[in-house]
Image (cartoon, rainbow, N blue to C red):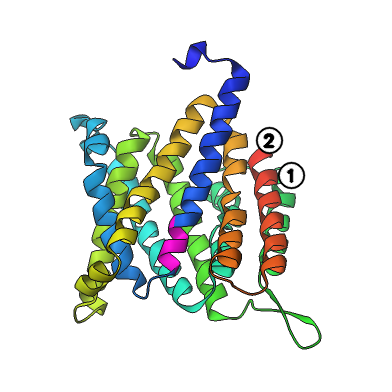
Amino acid sequence: MVGIIHPIQMEFWAILLVVGSSFIHAFWNLLTKKVEEGVPFLWWAFGISLIVYAPLGLAFLSKAEFFSPAGIFIFFGGTFEVAYFLGLSKAYARGDLSLVYPLARSAPIFVPIWATIFLKESIAWMGLMGILTVILGVFVVSLRWGTSLLSPELKNQPVSLALFTALASSGYSVVDKVGVSYMHPIPYIYLEFAITWLGLGLYLLLFHRGNSLSKTWQQNKKSILLVGIFMTLSYLLILFALRIGKVSYIIALRQISIVFGVLLGSLILKEKYGKTRLIGALIIWLGAILISLAP
């Protein structure tokens, strides 16, 4: 099928898939931001996702892959995912979507560094410029209008939690880059989500008391169903885009979700500092493009 599609049409459909995936990712983050109990909400969403996508996830899984090295990477990737979603939920409980989301998506700062240390990759000058550009964007997003001067919020808890989330995201990104070489990406991410669901469940068992799970379900059924479907769908759309488009361009364009996140926070949730955060989001996106296109 792919072979009979004109190259220009392929790039068009790849772009459409990436933009759609990016908006869906920002939208399910909007729904997550709006709930009171973030961790129980995400636990339910992962459970729904595992049920909905079970036929697809297990269809690609061969018996031999259970005994491959992929299992190690799935475990560590899932552990980083647990850290990511715990940090994200706690950041949303304390900060705006238009502040937290772009910072949580600033993993391009860390990924090249970890790839250099653990995968022995090198950072080209364009990649280094991209890292510095992302750092500048993070600073701009963190600015707020003071009484007389712009003052950064970098020491505030939501910012710290969002940057921790980005760090965790860079961790599973590097782990997954190696892990998918041992297993097809679809069952890989499905099993990694299962580890994440178990990890979030363990956290709730140890640190949550009362009826938070049942209460969260009763109050947020529709949002839980949407997030459960969308969080996996956004990733699957990227996988399909990677099959028909240029990898470096897709990875760069994917960060447009940062812009969508800021716009949703500013327009839907009526959050402050929208213009400043939009400028910062665009700078982060530019930095991500430089990193993705670096040789």
Residue located farthest toward the right when viewing the structure as drawn: 148
Residue 227 placement: quadrant: bottom left
Please tell me how crowded label 1 is: few (under 14), some (14-19), or many (20+) other residues with Cα within 10 Å: some
Q: Which quadrant of the figure contains the N terminus? A: top left
**Amino acid type at mark 2:** Pro
Query: How many numbered markers are drawn?
Result: 2
Q: Which residues are magenta?
A: 28-33
Q: Which one is nearer the viewer's eye here, 254 or 66?
A: 254
Query: Regarding mark 2 in the picture, which secondary structure is present there?
Result: loop
Q: Is residue 51 left or right of residue 12?
A: left
- Residue 55 drawn above or below residue 168: above
Q: Position of residue 201 (x, y in %)?
A: 23, 65
Q: Main secondary structure of the magenta part?
A: helix
**Residue found 21% across the figure and 47% down from its top:** 51
Q: Position of residue 162 (x, y in %)?
A: 52, 68
| Marks 2 and 1, the one that precedes in the sequence | 1
Please tell me how crowded label 2 is: few (under 14), some (14-19), or many (20+) other residues with Cα within 10 Å: few
- Residue 173 drawn above or below residue 205: above
Q: Position of residue 144 (x, y in %)?
A: 70, 77
**Amino acid type at mark 1:** Met
- Residue 55 drawn above or below residue 87: above
Let me know if residue 30 is in the magenta part.
yes
Residue 31 placement: quadrant: bottom left
Residue on which disc 1 sits = 126
Let me know if residue 192 is in the magenta part.
no
Identify the mark at residue 52; answer none if there is no mark.
none
Q: Position of residue 42 (x, y in %)?
A: 33, 63
Mark yes or no: residue 132 visible: yes
Q: Which one is nearer the viewer's eye here, 87 or 118?
A: 87
Mark yes or no: residue 118 visible: no
Question: Do the CB atoms of the residues marked 2 and 1 lie less than 8 Å apart?
Answer: yes
Residue on which disc 2 sits = 295
